[in-house]
Image: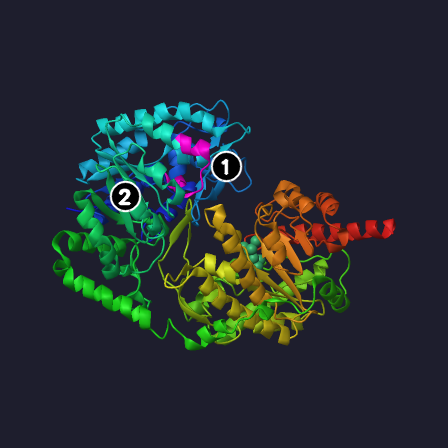
């Protein structure tokens, strides 16, 4: 019989119950017992939903993050929280968020506040984990209580439990040595604690333990390869069977290494890493289990079960009982249950599978392998019909879009003149002072704005009233910016709920779920739009708002768009064509919008690429290919304009050192980036690489409530001017202002504008 199992289940709850429970606990509106009870209830429910599986993950539930859980299990708490005397759960939240609960009153003493752990992306997903902290003295001590309690809980409910942990090599790789010491030197101290943990799990009745080592799909140097060998040879004698799980890509050159690690079984990503599967099976000692992740764990499409069976059946004949089936990775990255959706049309819904549906697909595959396809004939034929309908649907395949993409030639992606010529023409047209000031686009999203948008969506506000409400906000925003004396204004983005959703809702080829939430970090969830078909822009998306805003001022007003790469990277995208093909379609749609804005007289247009860096492949060897098409798509969207039109782009990060050449190749006239938090150190990248165009290093950290003073901003800009000629510098915040309050934004921007004046005066004096 084929063994079915799962690597992890979404823990946030179908209705985001965990999110709301956490936030209420943090606000002091509920107590710890209630939170624990909700956790237990979610685990029970999720185990029940997985009850058809032969092995069910336990320990994948987390109140915040599975990597932080592992740090606590290993006793690796940051030094600054070690002496905490309160409840361990509160200490856990202090590491996660810098505090255990909101301070009793908004401005009261923030008792128990500490620096939060750093957060970063989990491999190439949009999930973020808390980075383990190490130094040369880091010691580990086992605290297996969380895992043992959940294991006991599961066993008491009759769940065929398979504990899940992050493996030692990946755990070390994900952490940061704060003192610059060698993390790998800690492996010898870490392994005995892992050995104790596995013994404790064996004592508690676990037969299999899933040990996650997604690091295996990345490029490993000799030291890290050696670490894998060392680790698993040392854990070899433990009494549980280890299922070593790799996911998010092919094992590629690590196939031999993985095949020969002394573990009882290996899990492989057979969706994103299918190429390595056969090689691995050829190399695998004949007693080992092979778990194949055949259902896409990070996208929302139905699996083509017939095609999957065509591929699996020969492997099943070859491997027999040794073949296990699972989703490619933890289902943490997909929404819980498609059945909850009420507003998706039936045709589209038939193409989709969320976590619950993915487990059902797994079951069908297992039965088909064990008993033959006849045994699941109906399920297979329904599945085939859905896949066929998706393959043929005119909503997915639009000949006009195909033709437009086929007609793209290199000229479309090229500005008419080189930067120097454009800059001169733009300067003449825009007549901006030195150190021009601007913002990144959004202004505070007040409760009234959100309410107006909500009521409009619910049909309680008609289009005219809604327009009036938004125009009033735009007018306020323009008025405030004029009063502040900013140089290039924005309309404020009041009408936008989200920078991707806003465009997705207006483009053909996009759909939206009601409950398709996915955890991004902690209690924060996102609902990625579903990009299912060829992209077309039926009508202008931003022109009316922008034109209205421009009509209120003589200063240049910046049109504001989300770029094609960001639209792609923050959506669930189609899997029936390469990502780059989808991105090109998005680029053409944004290009049309850019040209419409230009025709409407807009002189400055910003195309945000907040998520460009996020799309970088896990393997460096593939970076070049990705960056080439990503940059080409940006250029395609931006470069149809006349020389006089100024193109801006914005990115919410500043690690540019490794992608600088690509950023420059985007050829935006102006780029605004984040830098304020590191006092411009991040601009070091600009010392080695001569960035040719204009740049606005963020001088106001919008992520913090602090209001920067003028001297601070002048200091930052002077630092920037050491690396970039002053005539190419802009003065701006480091991201949009939508999460801040007007009371914070006004004084901060006032400092910014007065800092720019001061900088101009000092240039004038020097001249
Ligand atoms: N223009 C967007 C804003 O100002 C950019 C947001 C972002 O970079 N994440 O909100
Ligand atoms: Zn940003």
Viewer-proximal residue, 681 or 420? 420
Q: Is mark 1 within 8 Å of ligand 2?
A: no
Q: Which residue is mark 2?
A: 282
Q: Which residue is mark 1?
A: 116
Residue 263 placed where, x, y %? 28, 33
Q: Which residue is drawn at the image coordinates 47% and 70% (left, top)?
A: 506
Q: Is residue 465 magenta?
A: no
The structure residue drawn at horizontal position 53% and vertical position 30%, both measured from the top left corner, is 178
Residue 649, position in %: x, y?
61, 59
| Secondary structure category for the residue under label 2 | helix
Dot 2 and dot 1 residues touching (CB under 8 Å):
no
555 on left or right of 134: right
Alpha-carbon span between mark 2 and mark 1 = 46 Å
In the image, residue 585 above or below residue 85: below
In the image, the residue with mark 2 has its CB under 8 Å from the nearest atom of ligand 1: no
Is residue 222 in the magenta section?
yes
In the drawing, does residue 68 fall left or right of residue 162? right
In the image, residue 123 lies at what x, y percent? 43, 45
Image-quadrant location for residue 484: bottom right
Residue nearest the observer in this picture, 256 or 609: 256
| Span colored in magenta | 213-227
Q: Looking at the picture, does residue 361 appear above or below residue 5? A: below
Judge whether 13 appears above or below 636 on screen: above
């Amino acid at each position: 019989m084929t063994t079915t199992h799962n690597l992890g289940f979404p823990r946030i709850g179908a209705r985001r119950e965990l999110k709301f429970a956490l936030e209420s606990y943090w606000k002091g509106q509920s107590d710890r017992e209630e939170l624990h009870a909700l956790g237990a209830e979610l685990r029970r429910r999720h185990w029940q939903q997985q009850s058809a599986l032969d092995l069910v993950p336990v320990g994948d539930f987390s109140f915040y993050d599975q990597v932080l859980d592992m740090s606590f299990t290993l006793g690796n708490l940051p030094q600054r929280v070690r002496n905490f005397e309160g409840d361990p759960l509160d200490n856990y939240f202090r590491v996660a968020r810098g505090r255990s609960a909101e301070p009793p009153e908004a401005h009261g003493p923030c008792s128990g506040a500490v620096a939060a752990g750093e957060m970063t992306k989990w491999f190439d997903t949009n999930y973020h984990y808390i980075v383990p902290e190490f130094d040369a003295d880091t010691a580990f001590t086992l605290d297996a209580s969380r895992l043992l309690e959940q294991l006991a809980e599961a066993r008491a409910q009759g769940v065929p439990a398979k504990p899940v942990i992050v493996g030692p090599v990946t755990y070390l790789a994900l952490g940061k040595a704060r003192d610059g010491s060698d993390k790998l030197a800690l492996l010898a101290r870490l392994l005995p604690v892992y050995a104790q943990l596995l013994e404790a799990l064996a004592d508690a009745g676990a037969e299999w333990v899933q040990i996650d080592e997604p690091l295996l799909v990345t490029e490993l140097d000799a030291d890290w390869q050696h670490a894998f060998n060392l680790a698993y040879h040392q854990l070899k004698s433990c009494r549980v069977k280890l299922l070593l799980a790799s996911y998010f890509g092919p094992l590629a050159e690590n196939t031999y290494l993985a095949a020969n690690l002394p573990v009882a079984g290996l899990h492989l990503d057979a969706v994103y890493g299918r190429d390595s599967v056969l090689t691995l099976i050829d190399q695998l000692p004949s007693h080992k289990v092979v778990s194949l992740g055949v259902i896409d764990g990070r996208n929302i499409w139905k699996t083509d079960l017939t095609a999957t069976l065509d591929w699996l059946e020969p492997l099943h004949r070859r491997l027999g009982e040794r073949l296990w089936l699972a989703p490619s990775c933890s289902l943490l990255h997909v929404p819980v249950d498609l059945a909850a959706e009420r507003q998706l049309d039936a045709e589209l819904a038939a193409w989709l599978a969320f976590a619950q549906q993915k487990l059902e697909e797994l079951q069908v595959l297992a039965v088909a392998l064990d008993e033959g396809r006849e045994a699941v004939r109906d399920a297979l034929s329904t599945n085939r019909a859905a896949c066929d309908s998706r393959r043929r649907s005119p909503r997915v395949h639009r000949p006009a879009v195909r033709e437009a993409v086929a007609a793209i030639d290199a000229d479309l992606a090229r500005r008419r003149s080189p930067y120097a010529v454009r800059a001169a023409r733009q300067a003449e047209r825009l007549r901006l002072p030195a150190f021009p000031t601007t913002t990144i686009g959004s202004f505070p999203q007040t409760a009234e704005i959100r309410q107006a948008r909500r009521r409009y969506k619910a049909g309680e506000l008609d289009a005219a009233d809604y327009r009036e409400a938004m125009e009033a906000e735009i007018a306020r925003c323009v008025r405030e910016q004029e009063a502040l004396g900013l140089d290039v204004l924005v309309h404020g983005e009041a009408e936008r709920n989200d920078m991707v959703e806003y465009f997705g809702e207006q483009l053909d080829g996009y759909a939206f779920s009601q409950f398709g939430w996915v955890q991004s970090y902690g209690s924060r969830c996102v609902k990625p739009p579903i990009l299912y078909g060829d992209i077309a822009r039926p009508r202008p998306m931003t022109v009316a708002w922008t034109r209205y805003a421009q009509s209120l001022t003589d200063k240049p007003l910046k049109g504001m768009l989300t770029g094609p790469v960001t639209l792609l990277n923050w959506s669930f995208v189609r899997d029936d064509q390469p990502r780059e093909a989808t991105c090109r379609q998005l680029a053409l749609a944004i290009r049309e919008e850019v040209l419409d804005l230009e025709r409407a007289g807009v002189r400055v247009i910003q195309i945000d690429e907040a998520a460009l860096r996020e799309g970088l492949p896990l393997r460096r060897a593939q970076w070049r290919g990705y960056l080439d098409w990503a940059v080409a798509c940006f250029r395609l969207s931006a470069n149809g304009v006349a020389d006089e039109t100024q193109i801006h782009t914005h990115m919410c990060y500043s690690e540019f050192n490794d992608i600088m050449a690509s950023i420059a190749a985007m050829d935006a006239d102006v780029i605004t980036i984040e830098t304020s938090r590191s006092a411009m150190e991040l601009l070091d990248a600009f010392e080695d690489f001569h960035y040719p165009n204009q740049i606005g290093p963020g001088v106001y950290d919008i992520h913090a409530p602090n209001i920067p003073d003028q001297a601070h901003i002048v200091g930052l800009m002077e630092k920037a001017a050491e690396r970039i000629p002053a005539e190419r510098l802009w003065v701006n915040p480091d991201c949009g202002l939508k999460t801040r309050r007007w009371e914070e934004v006004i004084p901060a921007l006032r400092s910014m504008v007065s800092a720019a004046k001061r900088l101009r005066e000092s240039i004038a004096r020097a001249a």
